[in-house]
Amino acid sequence: MEGTRFNLVTVLGHTAGGKTAFAAHLADQIDGEIISADSRQVYRGMDIGTGKDYDDYLVGEKRIPVHLVDIMDAGYEYNLYLFKHDFLRVYNDVIEKGKMPLLCGGTGLYIEAVLRNYRLLHVPVNRELRNDLEKKTYEELAAILKLYGPLHNVTDTVNRKRLIRAIEIAMYQGTSTSDASAGYDLVPLVLGIRYERTVRRRRITERLHHRLKKGMVEEVETLLKKGVPAERMDYYGLEYRYITHYLLQKVTYEEMVEKLNSAIHQFAKRQMTYFRGMERRGIPIHWIEGELELENKLELALSLYSSD
């Protein structure tokens, strides 16, 4: 749809809300590509527990492109700083292709970090700098990156390529001015999918049992066997934490399911609390009721997207 004033569409909401399938169908309508805003779906091998359903990206026979999914091995700690840089890189790529970026997910901190940072800089490739950095050792690159402030940490040093790109971005931001920058204003349309509380709770419980049947316990067991430390599973969230406790025989299977189910309900409640806070902090969210049929949801979204 041409002529829209927006250059980013965001789809957010609580867990088990059907955000991905909705975003994929919306992307199909507006010639868009999805950028994931999920702090755990970045990890390879963490599929069932993080809610990756690749079929959600299918619209008929068409697969909608999705970015920032399966980009890191389990074991690393992905963080907000790394996400912001990855988002900026992908966002620029999608825009340059003439497509509409759709940021989709439930990690409120990631989403707000994008939406409140309204001035986005396009950081060009600096071939001369890269050639110079390629001559340096890994340790020298890490030391250079540390010079650019406390936001940089170990997750920016996953490999040489990430190190060099992080230095390139940091140096550009440190030397560019507002007049010389190749930035542009972010004009976002923020859509939220929400369900009534009792329906939300039912959907969460049903999805949990479905995931367990699909092999979520076996997924966690595989990660542990591959060498991901048990203590790291706490960092990866509820499903991985409680299932690890079960595999370590700290709780029974029934206790694990009960505690995990309760914890996910509390998590969804915290998500909605965070999104309400975003609204209070000046980010307007256009809420769409989850109980509506997909066609009606899309109709509402498209009317907002094409409005002046």
Image: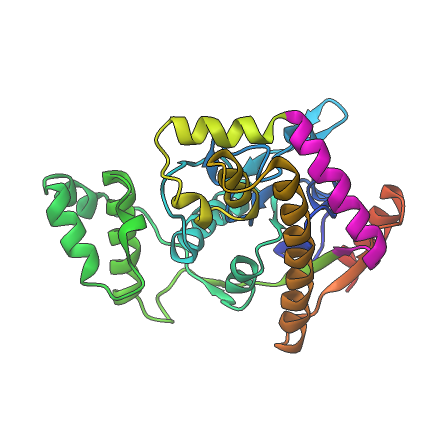
Q: In this view, does 284 lie to the left or right of 39?
A: right
Q: Residue at x 15, y 42 (%)?
A: 138
Q: Residue at x 57, y 55 (%)?
A: 107
Q: Can residue 41 be seen in this view?
A: no
Q: Is residue 142 visible?
A: yes
Residue 214 against residue 142 in the figure, above or below: above
Of helix, strand and loop, which mostly describes the magenta segment? helix
The stretch drawn in magenta includes residue 48:
no
- Identify the image's colour scheme: rainbow, by chain, secondary structure or one colour: rainbow
Q: Report the front residue among 122 and 244.
A: 244
Q: Tally the marks.
A: 0
Residue 201 against residue 5 in the figure, above or below: above
Q: Residue at x 40, y 48 (%)?
A: 78
Residue 73 lies, in percent from the top left, at: 39, 34
Residue 85 against residue 27 in the figure, above or below: below
Quarter residue 229 falls in: top left
Q: Report the front residue among 165 and 177.
A: 165
Residue 208 lies, in percent from the top left, at: 69, 39
Residue 36 lies, in percent from the top left, at: 56, 45
The stretch drawn in magenta includes residue 203:
yes
Q: Is residue 163 left or right of residue 120?
A: left
Q: Which residue is drawn at 24% across and 59% down?
A: 171
Q: Report the front residue among 214 and 7.
A: 214
Q: Give the range drawn in magenta.
A: 193-214
Residue 173 lies, in percent from the top left, at: 31, 63
